Amino acid sequence: VDHGVFEQIALVLAVCVAAGGLAVLLRQPLLVGLLIAGVLVGPGAFGLVEATPEVELLGEIGIALLLFVVGLKLDPRLVRRLGPVVLLAGSIQVSLTALAAFGIAWAFGVDLIGSLYLAAAMAFSSTVIVVKMLTDRRELEQLHGRIAVGILIVQDIVVVLLMIGLATVDPESGIGLASQAGAVVLRGLALLAIVFAAARWVLPHVTPVLARQGELLVLASVTWAVVVAALAIVLGFSGEVGAFLAGTALASSEYRDAISGRLSALRDFLLVFFFIDLGVRLELGGVEDLLLVAALSAFVLVGKPLLVAVITTRLRFRARVGVRSGLTLAQISEFSLILVALGVSIGHVDGRVVGLVTGVALVTITASTFLSSRSEVFVPRLSPLLERFERPPVRPEGPEAGALPDPTVIVLGLGRLGRTVVTELDESATRSCWASTSIRGASSGPSTRSRSSTATPRTRSSPTTYRSLGSAGSSAPCGTSTRTGRCSQPSATTATRARSRSPSTTRTRPRSPDGSAWTSSCGRSTKRPGPSWNGCARTHPRAPRPSQHLGRFHCSSQTRSTA
Amino acid sequence: VIEGAFEQIAAVLAVCVVAGLLATLLRQPLIVGLIAAGIAVGPEALGLVEASDEIELLAKIGISLLLFVVGLKLDVRLVRALGPVALATGLGQVLFTSAAGYLIAISLGFTVVQSVYIAVALTFSSTIIIVKLLTEKRELDHLHGRIALGFLIVQDIVVVLAMIAITAVGDTTTDGSLLGQFASVVVRGAGLLLVVGLIGRYVAPRVTHVLARTPELLVLAAVAWAVALAAVTILLGFSEEVGAFLAGMALASTPYREALSSRLSTLRDFLLVFFFIELGTSFELTAAAEQIPAAVLFSLFVLFGNPIIVLVIMGYMGYPKKVSFKAGLTVAQISEFSLILVALGVTQGHIGDDVVGLVTAVGLITITASTYLIYGSDRIHDRLEPLLRVFERSRVRSTAELGTEREPVDVIVVGLGRFGRTVVDELRTAGDRVLGVDWDPRSIRPDAWGGDVQVIYGDADDPELAEQLPLSGVRWVISTLRDVDGNLTLLHSLERAGYRGRIVVSADDEADEARLEQAGADLTIRPLHVAATPLMDLLHDHGRRGSGEDH
């Protein structure tokens, strides 16, 4: 009896776990471990895998599931929510990065198609890794995190479009032969028609029956993904596109969440085989290839963040935000690997390109996790260099700042909490002045005054006062910061310090949201039993110097009981 | 014939879904649909399967995972409690069935060798199918499920010995006696047990803790461990089931076992489909059709004789009749091993196609019939109850000794971030019994909390999470995660698990809030919104007083 394949797979899995465990111990993403495992079991190193058809099949199903889930989760609302600024930033980033990478590859003497593939591969950053990184550092909700995720979504859309385009290009007859365009369009329409006819008339009736048994639902979703992928292959497209379409066809189904939740374990497991297959296919090149990997990696690590930083800064974000967004995106994506693997299966490129991209992926993913963990070091040094790209905030028409009455409340940070506060303040006719580092926060906010280098005040008939923060800081009776986490932004240096009118100047720690005590802001509390505060800051003889608190915000409050 | 392995798998899967859909619509067990699909794609019908290597591989991984998950739920205590009954019923049933089966075969005019093969083939029940059925019925944790599992494992070990005996008899050139080979099996088995035991005791607790920092890695490592140990046991001459089962047992005492078993369930169910396809394709229908009369006789013997012998043995040992009956039903079929065994016999030249056809037919009949029997076991038991009294002793053993006890809880808090910890602290102060769920291995350490909070490892993105939670008596489930997808998954899974209490989830904005409430959340809180409200009260208070004094 031949048990060979099963034992080989067992061995391969063991190598993956060992490499993955090592990566996790060294605080590297799992992806790095899997890539290394792929190279290790491949013919270049130990040559453990002979069972290539099986590994390839499992990897193909894994990729199909990956794209199926991407399609499943594609939410038109998400794209709309992005806003034009991020959309623009993403598109510019992808095209400029690709252009520069193409130049590097071309200069190293890579052929035209190879250079194109390399260029595309360098343009994408890894959603999985970036989101994990931001989540771990609790930065997903911060401005630079949101910009980075927005750019990633744009990139994902570009990847899918590229995959559709690539598979229709015949490698033998050259690129984009016009005579075939008609046939390609026809076949594409046929595929779309089949999938969406099924989505419209078949799936809605079938899914409720399938969902009676969770197991059958999973089986059926995998089948749907694989069958449409196979159909796409038969029609001359790539399986990836088919699987993606299969996902979008189910995106509006009520079982969407149930399906994607259940498929994730299966997808992650099968994707392991994609990385193994990749490792088996890649060819380790000579010195010249090493140099090219080094050049491309350097570009991805330095050029790409810089590019992102400049673009975002030119789009009126603060330089610091731009630098942090850029640093987050300094790696290439697993989609880059999928793209070149697709190129290999179509016959556009050979194992050498796979090897190059795998090398760059390994270097940049490892380095970018490191870079991002040291962002405290890099950001303050790099930001000043980029400040020359900063542009002043848009000044919409409206009354001049000086013509408005002084604010009574200053709100720093317009995240979700900040917005709620400002809205409520507006409703209660309190004059407020708020500051944000977000363009969107500023422009879509309520009728309040905002101030930051990029903030956009907008006027409405509301009693809210408009003043620049610097001067408002000295006049507001209460400063409120809604930011949590480290408060080190320069704008906070001008923050005003407020004292409670209550004699007991207490600062309460966040407690249960039952309202018995309110949640205070960031920073350390400097508990000062100073004299009862009288009037607004302007009249106060001991008005704080702007430099005094450096963002260590003192927000005093009183508990409900004392109120 | 379809080109390409990927396209073939697609076609095979499509047939399976259609068969599964039909089975569901006709209210038949899914397994029957899948076996039918296997027959349909097999060489005697559509002939779709050429990629049999791939299917075999997937099936094997699926089997490993199935048994691994079973092993995860068994710790040493249970083995000790159930060992005697499993051994007695397992061996008793093997002896009885093989003896009676041999006599029936001889009396039907088969030769001695043929009769031996038939007898051995009839003896084994399919571990995989039983475990699958009991998992579906959620009866694996019941007493009868565990006893059934016990004697199935005993059978699996007997299979190994039988296989060795058969190959040894066929191969006269083997040096060393049969006894010597048996002895070496025992030695290898003991060595394997020792190594796995040591790993489970000393290595697994430490390694899993590191691996659990990345949930995906934990799942991958579990699969790798199950498959690797299965491969090792195959190399040692045992079946992969035994190895995967041991792999699961080694991890049974880690805190991650529930999370693992629920995380692996989709993977297992999906891969197991290929087992049924393989099973379906291995039925040789034309040969089977010629043997129908004899097959019906043997099938009746398996369907009635096997349960009765288990009833007798367990009744004698003092188990209540319902437990004995339901355990007995699980042996009322023959196994995929029986098919492998007769195939082996053909290659050895011991038997011809007639025996293969016979065993195939018996397999088809008994596997299908026993699926229905197990599905309807409660109803059948109620019908037959008066008859079954014969098998019950006057003094019935207490069955309460088993079952994993967990302290009852009032509130379950999912997500132990800053907000979650605050909620837990407040609840604890208020005197509620709290169970925390988090996927950070550091927060489930016993020393991370004062001791009066139970914390288990779980992931809200896991659609089976609710299955791990002790939901009876829980009044509130509170999710402090502000991740909509995770919360939606949690809501669905609680609903499916039949949770009756109330559910609180957290959200970021109104759109998410609406989605969550639509999905069944009783209360949605927006932590940031909640935080703003008292702040506003405060500011208003200031504003009024401030402007009053200013002017």
Image: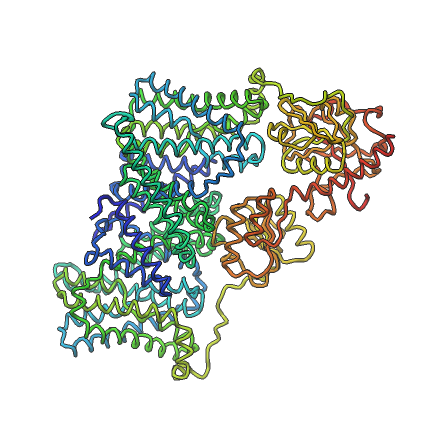
Please determine whether, in this image, residue A75 is positioned above or below residue A547: below
Please determine whether, in this image, residue B113 is positioned above or below residue A135: below
Please determine whether, in this image, residue B298 is positioned above or below residue B199: below
Please determine whether, in this image, residue A286 is positioned above or below residue B442: above
User: Horizontal placement of A92 versus B407: left or right?
Assistant: left
Seen from the viewer's position, the closer of residues B378 and B438 is B378
To which quarter of the image does residue B216 belong? Answer: top left
Percent from the top left, x then y, of residue A379? Answer: 56, 24
Q: How is the image coloured?
A: rainbow
Q: What residue do we see at 62% from left, 43% from top?
A: B418
Percent from the top left, x then y, of residue B428? Answer: 66, 54
Q: What residue do we see at 20% from left, 58% from top?
A: B45
User: Horizontal placement of A110 versus B402: left or right?
Assistant: left
How many numbered marks are there? 0
Percent from the top left, x then y, of residue A279? Answer: 31, 35
Percent from the top left, x then y, of residue B493? Answer: 50, 55
The N terminus of chain A: image quadrant: bottom left
The C terminus of chain A: image quadrant: top right
**Residue A272 shows up from this direction:** no
Q: What residue do we see at 49% from left, 30% from top?
A: A151
User: Horizontal placement of B211 versus A381: left or right?
Assistant: left
**Residue B439 shows up from this direction:** yes
To which quarter of the image does residue A45 belong? Answer: top left
